[in-house]
Amino acid sequence: MTRIAVLPGDGIGPEVTAEAVQTLDALALGFDFDVLEHVNADNYLKTGIALSDNDFERIATSDAVLLGAVGDPRADLAYARDVLLRLRFELDLYVNYRPATLCHDRLSPLREASRRAIDCLVIRENTEGLYAGIGGRLRPATTYEIAIDAETSTYHGVSRILEFAFTVARRSVCLVDKSNAVRHGGALWQRCWAEAREKYPAMPARHLYVDAAVMHLVHDPTAFDVIVTNNSYGDILSDLTAELAGGLGTVGSANINGSNGFGLFEPVHGSAPDLAGQGRADPIGAVLTGALLVEHLGHDDAARAIRAAVGQVIADRQVTPDLGGHLSTKDAGAAIRAQLSGAQRRTGT
């Protein structure tokens, strides 16, 4: 039995995660879902504990993790950090894996039809950079306050994320950095980039500064296959690619330990507390996150079936209002499962 730890989280997280779990369950893949409903902001506000050691152990010993969303305006920033960053750092989930594929032509914000079909993967270094938490504040809450956040890169961290990018690339790899302005970290990334290119000479590769990369993505996203970059640039660029693919609500992501294969899977969107409890949240991002999860566990046919079902409901406008439909979160999830069921009947699976 494959055990999947499920953290529904906060805001719309429980609503969209429920649809993802039901969709995975409908595939009859033999998954056992270990749902940690208490890992949320409500419990944190009561106990002061974001993620207990016992909960961490349950997650770490599972086969994979499905996360809804973490974040609540009532809780301080330490809460989300103590859940997400603890999992990323202690499980060494150094690969943030964010694919972006156009869901439907009508969802693209681009005017020119020939350049809409984005099929791109952002590989973001997930454990270093500006988000590592190195820095501090001197004389806080005064007019003399100084705040420092140090961007940290290591040879080990940079070389392994570049290695991962080249191993998953289909057509090309593009390194995005700002080495012309960020001299020291930039020099390290460029050194590791040269070594990676030498190791994979048959794979087309190019380098862009981050400001140029943003312009190129908007001009012609079809020119990109794999983009590999640091933590902060990857965070921003993957939101852009998600929007070019149909919106943040339609994209899944994974946090992967590239050495042992352990993965935590989460939709790109946040907890959206303003939508919570209204039945308006789009479940597609969570469902496609489920497709990434089953694919990662070796169920390629199931992942393709989920994506095909999602593509069909979008084409038929059997979706939530954000994508031009009128369905509720639950009804949109049910529509995806109806497509799956119909496909299974037609193929006899």
Image: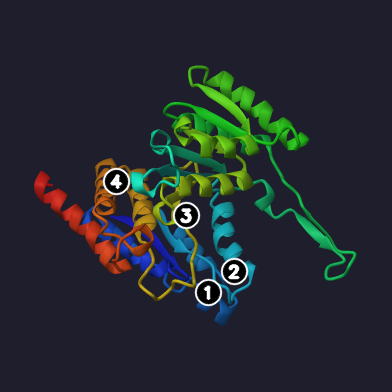
Picture coordinates of residue 113 (x, y %)? Answer: 38, 37
The label number, if any, that marks residue 41 in the structure image: 1
- How far apart, in angstroms, are the residues tagged by discs 3 and 2? 19 Å
Three-letter amino acid code of the residue under disc 4: Ala
Residue indicated by mark 3: 268
Residue, x 63% and y 23% (percent of image)? 194
Q: Are marks 3 and 1 in contact (CB under 8 Å)?
A: no
Q: Are marks 4 and 3 in contact (CB under 8 Å)?
A: no
Taking 114 as reference, is 177 left or right?
right
Give the mark nearest the N terminus, 2 or 1. 1
Picture coordinates of residue 333 (x, y %)? Answer: 28, 62
Give the mark nearest the N terminus, 4 or 3. 3
Taking 157 as reference, is 11 left or right?
left
- How far apart, in angstroms, are the residues tagged by discs 4 and 3? 18 Å
Q: Nearer the viewer, mark 4 or mark 3?
A: 3
Can the viewer see residue 34 in this picture?
no
Residue, x 28% and y 55% (percent of image)? 1
Three-letter amino acid code of the residue under disc 2: Tyr
Give the mark nearest the N terminus, 3 or 2. 2
85 over 275 or under it: above or below = above
Q: Secondary structure at mark 3?
A: loop
